[in-house]
Amino acid sequence: MFFYIDRWYKPGYYNLSGNTTSLVVNVYQEDFISMKGQMKRQLRAVRRSLRNKKLKFVQVVQKGNSVHLSGTADRWEQKVNAGFAAAHKGFKGVVNDIDVRGVVDTEMRLPAVQDSLLEGRSFDAVIVGGGVIGCAVARELSRQNITIALLEKESDLAMQASGRNDGMIHPGFAASPGTLKASYNVRGNRMYTKLAEELGFELKRPGSIILFKSPLMNLLKPIFRRRCRKNGVDGNYRGLSAEEVRKMEPYVTESQKGGFFLPSAGIVSPFRVTIALAENAAQNGAEIFLNTAVTSMDVKNGRISRIQTNRGSLQCGVLINAAGIWGDKLSEMAGDRFFSLHGRKGTDAILDIECSFYQNHILGMPSILGSKKNHSKGGGLVPCVEGNILIGPTSEEVPGREDYSTDSENFRKLLGQLSINQELKPVHIINYYSGVRAASWEEDFIIEPSGKISNLILAAAIQSPGLASAPAIGEDVARMAVESLRVAGVKVIKKKNFNPRRKAIPAVKDLSPEERSALIRKDPAYGEILCRCEEVSRGEIRDALVSSVPASTVDGIKRRVRAGAGRCHGGFCLSRVIMVMAEELGIPITNITRKGGSSRILLHETKENVSDETGI
């Protein structure tokens, strides 16, 4: 347990309150003199770093245990450079409030829904954020005999960072030794084998190969092995000669000069993992509230007493901040903003499933190991569990926290990565998309109880390798939340009837002929194929609409069973999916939306008083 002191005390005994316990310490004057001196040295280091970057306009002050930056910059890049210049100088966090001329702070998109669904309700634990972290926490907490609410502002789960990444379960090599990223990455990677078996989502471990551009990079192999040992990476990681790489990947670029193999690297569908975690949590009693955004909080005596949302106000015993890119804003609402987040946008492209035969492993070819300039691992080519191959991601610091636009410059960078595999061509690209990662200036996860608010737990600044780390983060954050509740007097005990298993929707495409025939005999709906590209049946779409966290939009169906995820982008199946949704949900087809809100696909009927079944 760490205790952060926000003001200087005279000598004597004091009660310094943490989140789950209190510690009485004898505070000696000479200790504080030493600590003051250390803080002054840290501030001088920040100012010196800013001067070296020619950022003299930045005002620097210490607030609590964080360094606070303010001022007005001419360009966005200056704000970014200032944030990184202030990091790693000994402070707990960097709060970057520099204004940029011509750039307006992003406002969070709020759901249009306004009702009183949650008014007056109370939960032991409230989780804000329906990404993979929030859902992992919900599943772990559902092992206990407590009431749980997960609040997600979008119309479905995994609609932001958790559904906009490449699905790679990193082996734990890239993270710097000693960081939270490194420890959670390796633990989480290890946990995925059991998690996939329990929750019924597909996990493959093709392994990853770091390709060397130069023969000199072969000298790095001992360094790579030492880093793997420090981080505890699993598997028989090893160096490869150029010939060994070519045997493993026949279509790899001729320019490669060897590589380093990490066999524990895996791949999953990130949205299916997120939804599986949430469905299992819901099966075990957690309540999932979509279209629900936190708008403010009441804090009394260092404790959150009430949460306001667009769907009414509620009370909670403990609040878990898993709000992704908005995590710093949520902490600010609670009164403990010791860090700030910035958006790092990455663009990926999807290749047609016919390319699956051209690559067996995850491939990357960094200059050395990622890029210090853009804080990226360098991107590459990642096979998907469904058979497609992803290119990317790129890396770009952006002011927009929900800026999912794509542009020609990032697309050009993606095309450059295609050269890793000689058989992959631009014509194979069927789609592309962007996501925004929630990065702190310190470039590490923030997983801890708040130092100021006794019932706030932080799971913030989760960027890559967040997907790989999610199961381990879920375990630790749930444990912190339980401890907080127990200190507050809540009796928390494990459920005897917790069911860790979730029955997945059967994927007709992946079944053997015998299994498929048996399933169709039992339920003919599985024999009616609506999506030809992905071979998705009517039965699968129906199942997605009635699960414990049901789909309610066309994109929600796509995330769960891949209807519309093929080359034609739903050109063949969209009308059929809409009709099935209308029938199963008992609503007019004009009420079906692409992604919730005002994204209606059909505005009104064009024919009335149809006299026969053909509509002619």
Image (cartoon, rainbow, N blue to C red):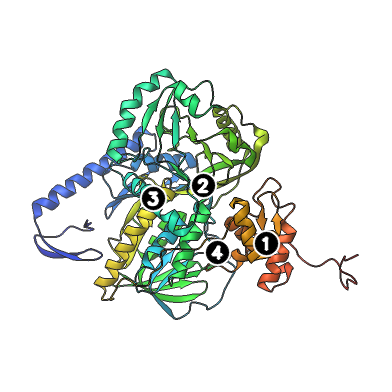
Q: How far across and how far down the image is residue 205, in percent? A: 45, 42
Name the mark on residue 538: 1
Q: Earlier in the sequence, mark 2 or mark 3?
A: 2
Contact between marks 2 and 3 (CB within 8 A): the answer is no
Q: Is residue 105 something one can see in this rendering? A: no
Q: Is residue 174 something one can see in this rendering? A: yes
Q: Earlier in the sequence, mark 2 or mark 1?
A: 2
Name the mark on residue 469: 3
Q: Earlier in the sequence, mark 2 or mark 4?
A: 4
Where does label 4 land, which residue?
110
10 Å neighbourhood of mark 1: few (<14), some, or many (≥20)?
A: many
Q: In which quarter of the image is the C terminus?
A: bottom right
Q: How far apart are marks 2 and 1 (CA)?
A: 28 Å
Q: How far across and how far down the image is residue 550, in percent? A: 57, 67
Kind of element beneath mark 1: helix
Would you identify the image quadrant in which residue 542 lies?
Answer: bottom right
Q: What residue type is labelled 3?
A: Ser
Q: Earlier in the sequence, mark 1 or mark 3?
A: 3
Q: What residue type is labelled 1?
A: Arg
- In the rendered view, does 616 fall on the left or right side of 543? right
Q: Which of marks 2 and 4 is in front?
A: 2
Give the farthest residue toward the top: 215
Q: How far apart are marks 1 and 4 (CA)?
A: 33 Å
10 Å neighbourhood of mark 3: few (<14), some, or many (≥20)?
A: many
Nearer the observer, 161 or 138: 138
Residue at left offset 27%, top offset 53%: 65
Would you identify the image quadrant in which residue 351 lies?
Answer: top right
10 Å neighbourhood of mark 2: few (<14), some, or many (≥20)?
A: many
Contact between marks 3 and 4 (CB within 8 A): the answer is no
Q: Which of marks 3 and 4 is nearer the N terminus?
A: 4
